[in-house]
Image (spheres, rainbow, N blue to C red):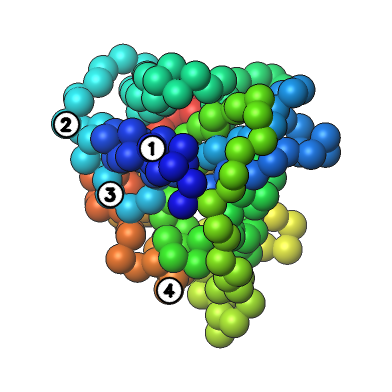
Amino acid sequence: MPRWYDEIAAALAGHGLIARGAFHPEPADGAPPETGTLLLAGNAGPAMWRAFTTARPTGPDPLDSWCSAALTAVAARFAAVLLLPSDGPPYHPFQRWAMRAGNVFRSPLGILIDPEYGLWHGYRGAFAFADRRDLPPRRARDNPCDGCAGRPCLSACPVAAFGADGYDVPACAAHLASAAGVDCMTGGCGARRACPVGRDHVFAPAQAEFHMRAFLAARN
């Protein structure tokens, strides 16, 4: 790995975060003008949750605020411009950047799947640099969904919120708010849990419930 990338990855690890790849943006990528290199930062598995709960932040949107503070500190250390998913509107195209930076693919659920982490990962920010830096080597990986027999993620949702017409957000939210939705609320999305990829990185119940409650609260 290039030294600059390793140094940022080490700094992120101190916050339970990980480097998620880097690339040289083209005009169609929607990066800020004069960006030569973009490095994505995110999370996978339980490490971020452990760091977050150890810090015990309070207030509205505590996880977003905590991530923003951690990434701001790392950006300042490396003289990077910090870009966050919450910036906007207009919002940064993080899914496009993720597919440019690493081997992630759009899953049948619409969210990105990683061949190692499965559906148990996320993107928390990006560091923009004006210069074109050496990029980390990128090993070619196949989309794990292509060889998935039966695609159980599509049939596991108890209210069939995932289908040919996309993701039925109101149906999902209504289920979570009902007595029948306790399993998804406390254990995490049933469709997501049905995916066989990345089982070693599945969120613990406390983390899964935190995300589900945040999802529901954002729609009330």
Relative height, residue 5 to residue 120 (above, below): above
How far is mark 3 from mark 1, CA to CA? 22 Å
Residue 59 in sight in this render: yes
Q: Which residue is mark 1?
A: 7
Choose mark 4 or mark 1, whichever is in front.
Answer: 1
How far is mark 2 from mark 4, CA to CA? 30 Å
| Tag 2–tag 4 contact (CB < 8 Å) | no
In-image side of 80 versus 176 (left or right): right
Relative height, residue 86 to residue 175 (above, below): above
Q: Earlier in the sequence, mark 4 or mark 1?
A: 1
> Tag 4: residue type?
Pro
Choose mark 4 or mark 3, whichever is in front.
Answer: 3
Residue 3 image point, x, y percent: 44, 42
How far is mark 3 from mark 2, CA to CA? 12 Å
Relative height, residue 29 to residue 200 (above, below): above
Q: Which residue is mark 4?
A: 196
How far is mark 2 from mark 1, CA to CA? 23 Å
Q: Earlier in the sequence, mark 2 or mark 1?
A: 1
Residue 204 image point, x, y percent: 25, 52
> Tag 3: residue type?
Pro
User: Observer-nearest residue: 217 or 57?
Assistant: 57
Residue at x-position 33% and y-position 59%? 202
Choose mark 3 or mark 1, whichever is in front.
Answer: 1
> Tag 2: residue type?
Thr
Q: Earlier in the sequence, mark 2 or mark 4?
A: 2
Q: Which residue is mark 2?
A: 54
Q: Secondary structure at mark 4?
A: loop
Q: Secondary structure at mark 2?
A: helix
Q: Secondary structure at mark 3?
A: loop
Relative height, residue 67 to residue 137 (above, below): above
Q: Which residue is mark 3?
A: 46
